[in-house]
Amino acid sequence: MREFLKLFFLLVYSCLNAQTAFHNIGNIQLHENAQLGFHTNLINDGNFDQNLGFTGFYKKLGFLEVSGTKNVIFNDIEFDVEENLYLNNSVGIKNTALFISGNVVTHRDVVDSTLEFLDYYVHSGEGDYALVDGYVTSTTKDEFVFPIGDADMLRPMILPKQESVKTFKGAYFSENPNTPSTFETSFDTSIKQNFLQNISEIEFWDLRGEEETEITLIWNSNSDIETITDNLNSLRVVGWDKTNNKWVDLGGKNIKGDFDNGFVQSSKFIPDNYEIITIGSDFNFVLGVETFNSHNYAFSPNGDGINDLFVIEGIDLRPNNTLKIINRWGAQVYSKKNYNNTWNGISENGATIKKSEGLPVGVYFYFLTLHDENVTHTGYVYIMR
C-alpha cells in the first residue's frame, strides 16, 4: 500500500507540474472494467504489464511518446494521436487494437522496439494514415495481417494460420533494396538466381522468425509491377539469402489481382535465413525451376567436389517432381521421383558398360515433370569429365 501511495503522488506531481509525462516507477494494474486515457507521454520504469480493461492514447495537436526501462502490456487499446505515437520501447496488446488517426512509429534501427500482438487479438481501422511505421511482432497460431507501412502508405503482409503458436516480426520499407537506410549492407538486385528476371527496386519487407511459414505480399499502384514483369503469372516472392548473398526464389502461388492491386503467396521458408523479402519475377516463366532450353548446361561428375552434381536451381520449391535422363539413342539412363539435385552422372541402366565409371562424355536429354502443375520441361545437359 505504501508503494502504491508513493507512486500515486509521484504521478500526480509529474502530471500537474511538468505536464509532460505519466511516469510509472512502481506497480500499476488496470482491472477488468478500468478505463485509462493517455493525453501525455508515458514513461514506464515499473511494472505495468498485468492489465485488463481499456487504454487509449489521444492528442489532436502534436505527438506522444512511450519510453522507459520496462515494456508495457495492455488489453484493449486505441490510437488517436494526429502526429503519431512514438514507441521507444515495446508496447504489447493482449486483446484488441483500434487505429483511429496517426501512426504508431517504432525505431527501424532498434528492432526490439515493436508493437506486439500477443495471444488473442483483433485489430481494425488501419489505413494509409493510421498504421505501424516500423516493426510489428505477432505471437499466435491464427492468420495475422501485419498492419504495417511507411509514412502514409499501408503495405501489409499476411501470415497464414500456423500449426502451433509461433512468433514472427515484420516491417515494410518504401525503399530501394540496393540502397537501404537502416541495414548495414545493400541488397544488389543484379545478384540473383539465373532464372529470376527482375527484383523490385521500389520496396521490400523485413520478416523475421525461426520457424517455417508462408507469407503473402500485397502490391498496389506504387509498386510499379509493370517494371518487374508484363505477365502477372511470373511474379515470385524473393528473398536475400544470408548464406549465398544473392536473391533467391521463395515461391509464387495464389497470384490474384491486376497491375495496380494484387497479392502473391510464397512457398514455405524460414524467415531468419533471409535478410529481406520482396516481389520479383521468373525469367523463364517455369514456376521457380530453372530449365536449360535457352542455354547449354554442363556438369563434370569427376569427384573433384566442383560441379559434380546435376543442379536444377529452385527444384526444392517443387519437390513433387520426376526427373528422367535419356541418352542420344533414346535409352533411359536415370530416373528419380522427388529429384533433389543428387544425380552424379552414374547410369541406372543395366546395359551401360562400366557403370561405376559414370556415363561417357556427351549430350543427354532430360524430362522434368512438375506434377502439381502437370507440366513437363525438356532440355539437354552435357556431361564432361
Image: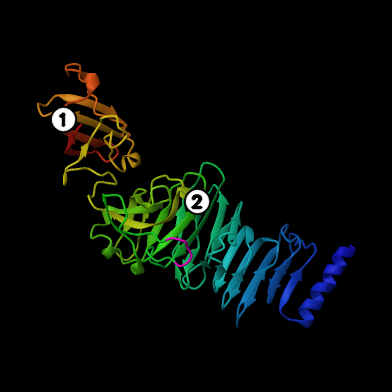
Q: Does the magenta segment cover residue 182?
A: yes
Q: Give the CA separation, mark 1 to mark 2.
A: 53 Å
- Residue 272 vs 321, above or below: the answer is below
Q: Which mark is residue 301?
A: none
- Is 220 left or right of 47, judged from the image as shown? left
Please, what is the dominant secondary structure of the magenta stretch? loop
Picture mark count: 2
Which x, y percent locates residue 342? 31, 31
Q: Which residue is mark 1?
A: 361
Most foreground residue, 200 or 148: 200
Nearer the camera: disc 1 or disc 2 = 1
The quarter of the displayed image where residue 15 is located? bottom right
Q: Of all residues shown, which one is farthest toward the left? A: 329
Q: Is residue 364 above or below residue 180?
A: above
Q: Which residue is mark 2?
A: 143
Q: Which residues are magenta?
A: 181-185
Front residue of 66/130: it is 66
Estimate how packed mark 2 is, as few (under 14), some (14 to 19) or many (20 or more) residues with alpha carbons within 10 Å. Answer: few
Under circle 2, the secondary element is loop
- Measured along the vertical axis of the image, is residue 184 above or below residue 38? above
Q: Secondary structure at mark 1?
A: loop
Q: Position of residue 38 (x, y in %)?
A: 69, 73
Quarter of the figure that contains the C terminus: top left
Q: Nearer the viewer, residue 149 or 209?
A: 209
Q: Earlier in the sequence, mark 1 or mark 2?
A: 2
The residue most toward the right is: 2
How crowded is the residue under tag 1: few (<14 C-alpha within 10 Å), some, or many (20+)? few
Type of residue at label 2? Glu
Q: Position of residue 41 (x, y in %)?
A: 68, 74
Relative to 279, is 91 on the left or the right? right
Image point (76%, 63%), residue name: 46
